Image: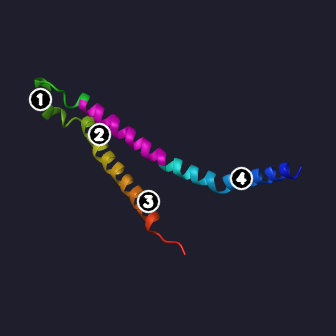
Amino acid sequence: MTNSLFNKVNLNKCIHVYNTYIKNKIEFIWNIGKIYIIWVFIYFSATQLYQYFCVHFSFMGFMVSPILVTAPYCIALRWCIVNGAEVITSMWLILGSWLVSMLVTTTN
């Protein structure tokens, strides 16, 4: 009887800890992770589309590339590539800085 009661108390404590602390942390990390995943998708898609539409791998593509480089869709794709790379790099730097701060920070 007491063993069953002890397990229910522990289960209730675990549920309370999960709802109070862990669930909020998971939601916070997921919200940040979604931003990273979206930027990676934008960067990857833009690089593939830029290669397909703006820099054809042929002699004719070489001849037409000075004209295509000024096309609005090529400018937009190039913006996504450049800014996507900067955002992804910044996110890695932020993650690395946070991890180092967690290792260096001392608790009393």
Which disc, if any, is residue 76?
Answer: 2
| Mark 2 residue type | Ala
Q: Residue at x 29, y 31 (%)?
A: 49
Q: List the residue tagged with mark 4.
A: 14
Quote the CA–CA distance across marks 4 and 2. 50 Å
Q: Are marks 2 and 3 in contact (CB under 8 Å)?
A: no
For label 1, the residue is 62
Q: Earlier in the sequence, mark 4 or mark 1?
A: 4
| Separation (CA) of disc 1 from disc 3 | 45 Å
Highlighted range, magenta: 33-51
Amino acid type at image mark 3: Leu
- The outermost residue toward the bottom is 108
Q: Position of residue 68 (x, y in %)?
A: 18, 32
Q: Amino acid at mark 4?
A: Cys
Whether 5 is among the magenta residues is: no
**From the image, which quarter does the C terminus lie in?**
bottom right
> Residue 71: x percent and y percent?
22, 35
Q: Is residue 52 left or right of residue 4?
A: left
Q: CA distance from mark 2 to mark 3?
A: 34 Å
Secondary structure under the numbered disc 4 in the rendered image: helix
Q: Which residue is mark 3?
A: 99
Label 4 to label 1, Cα distance in Å? Answer: 64 Å
